[in-house]
Image (spheres, grey):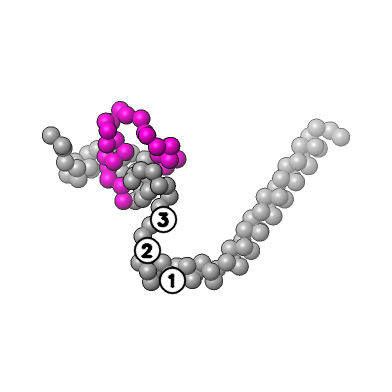
């Protein structure tokens, strides 16, 4: 058997496996739709908040509600104390240019 034929067989097998995974996922999603809808109703009825992703720091618990300087509360050059901080990207407001943020923060001076 030529190496190119073996490579083609491996690629074909992996492609079929990937297609099978997507088919099973679509079937599973359709099967769990009533349970998901019941969970949505429960969350709306009880008024639950966002999901807490991590339990370590306040800026990793609810990234949507973190203030701009919570990750840098000790000093701007300090390392992150919590491992979960490396799993979340910085908030979009910190990656934009600073000009739009001029009136949104106050200096502690």
Which label belongs to residue 41? 1
The residue depicted at 36 percent of the width and 40 percent of the height is 90
Of mark 1 and mark 2, the one earlier in the sequence is: 1
Q: Position of residue 66 (x, y in %)?
A: 31, 47
Q: Which residue is mark 2?
A: 48
Task: Tell me whether the residue at label 3 lies in contact with that at label 1, contact meaning CB atoms closer than 8 angstroms.
Answer: no
Q: Quadrant of residue 89?
A: top left
Query: In whole angstroms, how far apart are the C-alphas of marks 1 and 2?
Result: 11 Å
Residue 51: which numbered mark, if any?
A: 3
| Residue bounds of the magenta highlight | 65-89
Camera-near label (1 vs 2) is 2
Instruction: Report whether 108 appears left or right of 28.
Output: left
Taken as a whole, is the magenta stretch helix, strand or loop? loop
Left/right placement of residue 64 relative to residue 33 reads: left
Q: Is residue 100 left or right of residue 55?
A: left
Does 66 lie within the magenta span? yes
Taking depth in this image into account, of 80 and 2 the one nearest to the observer is: 80
Task: Report helix, strand or loop for mark 1.
Answer: helix
Q: Nearer the viewer, residue 99 or 64?
A: 64
* Distance from Cα at disc 3 to Cα at disc 2: 9 Å
Gap between marks 3 and 1 measured at Cα? 15 Å
* Image location of residue 43, percent across then percent down: 41, 67
């Amino acid at each position: 058997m030529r190496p190119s034929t073996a490579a083609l067989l491996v690629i074909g097998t992996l492609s079929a496996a990937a297609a099978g995974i997507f088919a099973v996922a679509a079937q599973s999603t359709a099967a769990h739709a009533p349970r998901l809808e019941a969970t949505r109703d429960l969350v709306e009825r009880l008024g639950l908040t966002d999901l807490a992703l991590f339990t370590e720091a306040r800026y990793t618990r609810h990234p949507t509600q973190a203030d701009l300087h919570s990750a840098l509360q000790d000093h701007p050059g300090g390392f992150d104390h919590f491992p979960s901080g490396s799993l979340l990207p910085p908030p979009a407001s910190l990656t934009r240019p600073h000009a739009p943020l001029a009136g949104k923060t106050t200096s502690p001076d």
